[in-house]
């Protein structure tokens, strides 16, 4: 091809952002990605989107995929099952929180979330509770780009022009230090939402156990989880966790849901299951959810062509095997705590850094206006975007977001390396990142002095 970057007006690919040149990634090796120019990027984001949890070039996974493709590449669920899907379901429920007994495979995270919502609604209908459809979810979240998953967030900035297509779910604000450090305000908002919908119409509370890009590394205080569990008991809705990112080891547990004070009824997972080698997700349900179908219509037939395909499931099996034999859940658990400390130490003394938080290898840094130490940074500074660009210049991949206009989060950076990164590579990621933050912080200082401070009051769509 001879090119090292592709301009948005020179490609047949409909670009994500017009006017931006995209470097071309040509190969990967462990946590390193090489572009067409020969530059090697240290990837602190597991392939950019937290999917490549085991790094690039895994011979074991490649061999498993090859062997499966040679034996039986594809067969559709409608007519036949296949041994690979059967084994993966068994192994996955084996590492899921107690009480989870069945899995249905999907192709992506968004369609796993959609299926979780359909299963929750069907659970109630199967039991004769046909009015329950409404979903309550946190406003500041991300669950995917499909219409239903977009509707699960209360973020006008993310909804764009698609509002007319989105079902009207109800949202509550996050319990961050800024808005609700105890979790009580979110519980009050949950009670108001239950009241507004009529608790007998509520199908599910839907959330990330630990947030990924929307509020990196954030999880509500324990009081919120306990209060949610009480309300589930009282009102009979289900709790669904989006574990698209947190599932399969990311937070130092097989599933983050096992570690909360409100173990969910349904879990949707995806990214780490295919580890970047195959597009595969899964929905896991507790036995009592399964029982509603078993005692009811005995059908849940919606699904995509590729759900449970042997090739993707063979990759999933090889991923679980690697996780087990290399002790990666334990490694992420133990090393993650240390990594959080190292990241905190490396960023210490930077007045724009308000919080370094997270679990396992799902870590986040939130930035504030140093003039009062708590307001969001003025969005026109584009702090997060500048962090990503400066990191890229230093051949480091991180992911920042700037959802300021939604009102519940400001500039923040996600730090989510592959589980297989060596100590040396993790150290290098931390030191490159600290350099980047210090240099961008110094760059924005004069602009910050001129920019009007913004209010920290939420302007988002939570009701
Ligand atoms: C928490 C969360 N849920 C859902 C999704 C959507 O997953 P997918 O892009 O595989 O549809 C993502 C993707 O980034 C995610 O981070």
Image: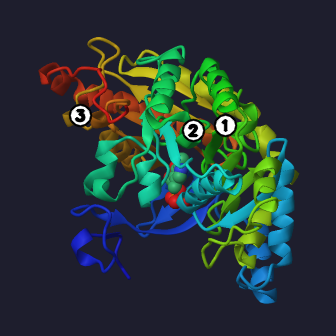
> Which residue is labeled 1 in the image?
236
Q: CA distance from mark 1 to mark 2?
A: 8 Å
Say few, some or many: other residues with alpha carbon within 10 Å of mark 2 (under 14 / 14 to 19 / 20 or more).
some
Camera-side mark, 1 or 3: 1
Q: Are marks 1 and 2 in contact (CB under 8 Å)?
A: yes
Q: Name the residue carrying label 2.
A: 200
Give the labeled residue for mark 3: 379
Alpha carbon distance from label 3 to label 2: 41 Å
Mark 3 or 2 closer to N-term?
2
Residue 181 located left or right of residue 128: left
Mark found first going from the N terminus, 1 or 3: 1
Residue at (81, 81) in percent of width and height: 67
Crowd band around label 3 with a 10 angstrom C-alpha radius: few (<14), some (14–19), many (20+): some
Name which of mark 1 and mark 2 comes first in the sequence. 2
Q: Is label 2 in a helix, a strand or a loop?
A: helix
SS class, disc 1: loop
**Quarter that holds the N terminus:** bottom left
Q: Nearer the viewer, residue 442 or 51?
A: 51
Name which quarter of the figure residue 299 lies in. bottom right
How many neighbours does mark 1 have within 10 angstroms: few (below 14), some (14-19), or many (20 or more)?
Answer: some
Residue at image location 80% in from the left, 71% down from the top:
85
């Amino acid at each position: 091809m001879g090119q090292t970057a592709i301009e948005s007006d020179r490609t047949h690919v409909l670009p994500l952002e017009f006017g931006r040149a995209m470097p071309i990634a040509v190969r990967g090796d462990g946590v390193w990605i090489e572009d067409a120019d020969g530059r090697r990027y240290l990837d602190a984001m597991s392939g950019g989107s937290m999917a490549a949890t085991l790094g690039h070039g895994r011979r074991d996974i490649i061999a498993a995929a090859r062997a499966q493709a040679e034996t039986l590449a594809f067969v559709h669920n409608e007519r036949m099952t296949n041994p690979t899907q059967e084994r993966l379901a068994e192994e996955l429920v084996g590492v899921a929180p107690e009480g989870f007994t069945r899995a249905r495979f999907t192709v992506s995270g968004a369609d796993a979330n959609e299926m979780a919502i359909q299963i929750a609604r069907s659970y109630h209908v199967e039991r004769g509770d046909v009015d329950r459809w409404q979903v309550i979810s946190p406003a500041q979240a991300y669950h995917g780009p499909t219409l239903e998953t977009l509707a699960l967030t209360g973020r006008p900035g993310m909804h764009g022009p698609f509002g007319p297509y989105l079902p009207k779910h109800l949202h509550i604000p996050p319990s961050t230090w800024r808005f609700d450090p105890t979790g009580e305000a979110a519980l009050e908002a949950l009670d108001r939402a239950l009241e507004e919908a009529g608790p007998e119409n509520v199908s599910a509370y839907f959330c990330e156990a630990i947030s990924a890009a929307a509020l990196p590394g954030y999880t509500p205080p324990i009081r919120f989880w306990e209060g949610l569990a009480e309300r589930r008991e009282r009102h009979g809705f289900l709790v669904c966790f989006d574990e698209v990112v947190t599932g399969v080891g990311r937070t130092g547990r097989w599933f983050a849901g096992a570690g909360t004070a409100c173990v969910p009824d349904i879990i949707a997972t995806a990214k780490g299951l295919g580890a970047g080698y195959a597009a595969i997700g899964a929905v896991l349900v507790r036995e009592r959810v399964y029982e509603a179908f078993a005692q009811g219509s005995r059908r849940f037939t919606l699904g995509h062509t590729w759900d449970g395909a042997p090739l993707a499931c063979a990759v999933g099996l090889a991923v679980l095997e690697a996780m087990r034999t290399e002790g990666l859940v334990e490694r992420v658990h133990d090393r993650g705590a240390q990594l959080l400390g190292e990241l905190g130490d490396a960023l210490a003394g930077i007045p724009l850094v308000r919080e370094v938080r997270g679990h396992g290898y799902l870590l986040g840094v939130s930035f504030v206006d140093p003039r009062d130490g708590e307001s969001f940074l003025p969005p026109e500074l584009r702090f997060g975007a500048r962090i990503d660009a400066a990191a890229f210049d230093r051949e480091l991949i991180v992911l920042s977001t700037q959802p300021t206009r939604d009102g519940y989060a400001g500039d923040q950076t996600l730090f989510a390396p592959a589980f297989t990164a060596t100590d040396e590579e993790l150290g290098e990621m931390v030191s490159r990142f600290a350099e980047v933050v210090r240099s961008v912080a110094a760059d924005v200082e004069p602009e910050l002095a001129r920019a009007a401070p913004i209010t920290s009051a939420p302007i988002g769509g939570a009701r």
